[in-house]
Amino acid sequence: QRPNMAEVIALDLFLLRCIATPFRDWQNLNTDLEGVVDEWGRGFTQELDYIEEAASAERFTLSMKEAGIDSVRAPTVVSEYTTSCVLVTEWIDGVRLDEAGAEASQVAEVDGVAASNVPRLCGVALLSYLTMLLDVGILHSDPHPGNLLIDRSDGALVILDWGLVTYISPEKQIAILEYVAHLANEEWDAVPNDLVAMGFVPSDKVEVVTKEPEVIQAISLGLKGLTKGGGMKEKISNVSVVADELNYARERYGNVFQVPSYFAYILRAFAILEGICLKIDPSYAIVKECYPYLSRRLFTDNNPRVIRALESLLYGAEPLPSPGEPRGRQLNIARLERLVGAYRRSSAYAAESASAASASAAGLEDEP
């Protein structure tokens, strides 16, 4: 760690804290800028503690093993040489995932890594981030391309730099699953409470949002754009487009809408992964790749709210009855088939992933 970092960061945060309130008032924003600066301060302080960073890396590797995802890990920490100001880990001899992805559609091998392995590892990275977000509750918050390496020794994905992590509460995890179900069914009446639960709208503003349906649909239709495939000509990341739309919504409806920090981090991670995959497959849609994980979670979680989200996905919003007819819902057979198929793929994923990693490692060992 460079010297005097704590003092430098403290001064920067003090100056930001001084201008946060007048800037918020000047822009008429709803966002708690003082709280944002405080959150940054907690994150920066956390990043200065290398023992905590080492613990986060080890926690991630352990949680992935427990989830049956053997082809992703953090670098192994050398505990006996690690202090609060010095972090020592194994050296990773690898190639950046984005650099491998950029050439994967043109060559069979990229810097010692099989190009055919890149899409699978993008899927592994996506699965690991979903597991962090919705299972573990500790999200790696610095997902730039330089922190995603393919290890030449065993073909595994290694995620570097665990200094900045975001904690996701169980309440927010369930709220995200509920929102996915409501969004799929276009149940706009349920969306305002979802946005409050996820942190997009303050609880005291929910009535304002309810009275302004264009706000709900602007936000929700933007997020629903994630389900579309990429463009063969432009190869623009849908996640990046969604991020731009959310920023526009924040500028236009800043008095009632904000983008929570954890969601900004997950959008950033998804945008990087989707951008890599779009270079290989122009029709790639990242939310469709999330389906196996979401299916497994919906079918196996006994939380009553998750069960209701599954029911909403399978039966849709309850329709208005015709005069004299009882209320009822119909099972969406096509959606059930997709969910069951995705669940089967998820169940077989761990063994397939481990087998692919072993094969990749064997191929790398055969290189001169």
Image (tube, rainbow, N blue to C red):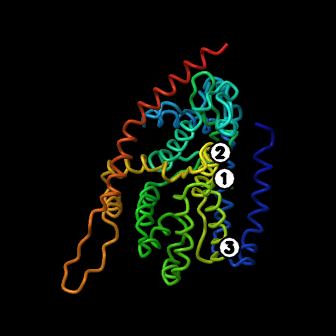
Q: Secondary structure at mark 1?
A: loop
User: Counting other residues with Cα less than 10 Å from the Cα at mark 3, is it few (<14), some (14-19), or many (20 or more)?
Assistant: some
Q: CA distance from mark 1 to mark 2?
A: 7 Å
Q: Please provide percent x and percent y for residue 24.
A: 71, 73
State the residue in front, 84 or 213: 213
Q: Please provide percent x and percent y for residue 353.
A: 47, 32
At 61% from the left edge and 30% from the top edge, which residue is drawn?
75
**Which residue was labeled with disc 3?**
251
**Which residue was labeled with disc 1?**
235
- Count the marks: 3
Q: Hey, what amino acid is under mark 1? A: Lys
Tell whether 26 sits left or right of 337. right
User: Counting other residues with Cα less than 10 Å from the Cα at mark 2, is it few (<14), some (14-19), or many (20 or more)?
Assistant: many
**Which residue was labeled with disc 2?**
279
Classify the position of the C terminus by image quarter: top right
Disc 1 to disc 2: CB gap under 8 Å: yes
Q: CA distance from mark 3 to mark 2?
A: 31 Å
Q: Quadrant of residue 163?
A: top right
State the residue in front, 120 or 11: 120
Tell whether 319 sits left or right of 1. left
Q: Hey, what amino acid is under mark 2? A: Lys
State the residue in front, 229 or 303: 229
At 73% from the left edge and 76% from the top edge, which residue is drawn?
27
